[in-house]
Image (cartoon, grey):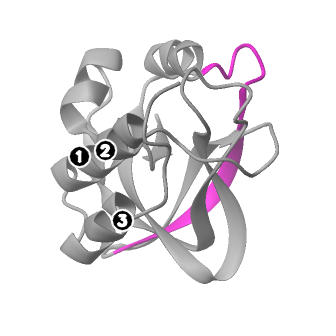
Amino acid sequence: MTLYAAYGSNLDPEQMHRRCPHSPVAGTGWLEGWRLTFGGEDLGWEGSLATLVEEPSEHVFVGLYDMTDADAEQLDAWEGADTGLYRKLRVRVQTLEGEKLAWVYVLDGYEGGLPSARYLGVLADAAEAAGAPDDYVRELRSRPCRSSGV
C-alpha cells in the first residue's frame, strides 16, 4: 500500500470510502511549503479546479489514505489522472507521528481563475468532515469564487 494525501473533495472520508472502499483513512497532516490554489478554468465544468503549488510560507491540510493498487487506479480515473488532467507528485506530509511520504494530484494546467461557489463549498465541507481546524475551513469558505456555476 502507498499513502495518498487528499486536499480537495477527497478529504471527505465518506466520499473516499465510496470511491476507494479498500483504502482506509490513515490520519491527517499538513503539506508544509505548499498552498491550495485553483487553475485550469477552461478545463472544469464550473470554473477553476483545486490544485497545489509550492509556496515556502504556506501549508495545506490533507487527509491520508492507505491506497491499494486497485483503488489508486480507480481514483486516477475519478481525478482524470489517466487522461492527463492531473499528474501525481510525491510529497512529504507532516503528521503527529512524524514525516510521511505520500502522493498527491496536481493539476496539469495554469494557475488562475475562480472556482464556483458550489465547488468551494464542497471543498470546505470535505475539509470539515476530515477534521480540519476551524480557521482552515473558515478561510476556505471565505475565498473569492464565481457566484454561479456557469
User: For the residue marked with disc 1, what is the amino acid?
Assistant: Asp
**Label 1 to label 3, Cα distance in Å?**
13 Å
The image quadrant of residue 58 is bottom right
Q: Position of residue 63 (x, y in %)?
A: 35, 51
Left-right relation of 13 to 6: left
Residue 11: tell me if it is visible.
Answer: no
Residue of label 3: 142
Label pair 2/1, CB-CB below 8 angstroms: yes
Residue of label 2: 121
User: For the residue marked with disc 2, what is the amino acid?
Assistant: Gly
Q: Is 145 covered by the magenta stretch?
A: no
Residue of label 1: 125
- Give, as a single range, the part of the protein colored magenta: 80-95
The image quadrant of residue 120 is top left
Q: Height in image: 49 above or below 68?
A: below
Q: Position of residue 147 (x, y in %)?
A: 43, 42
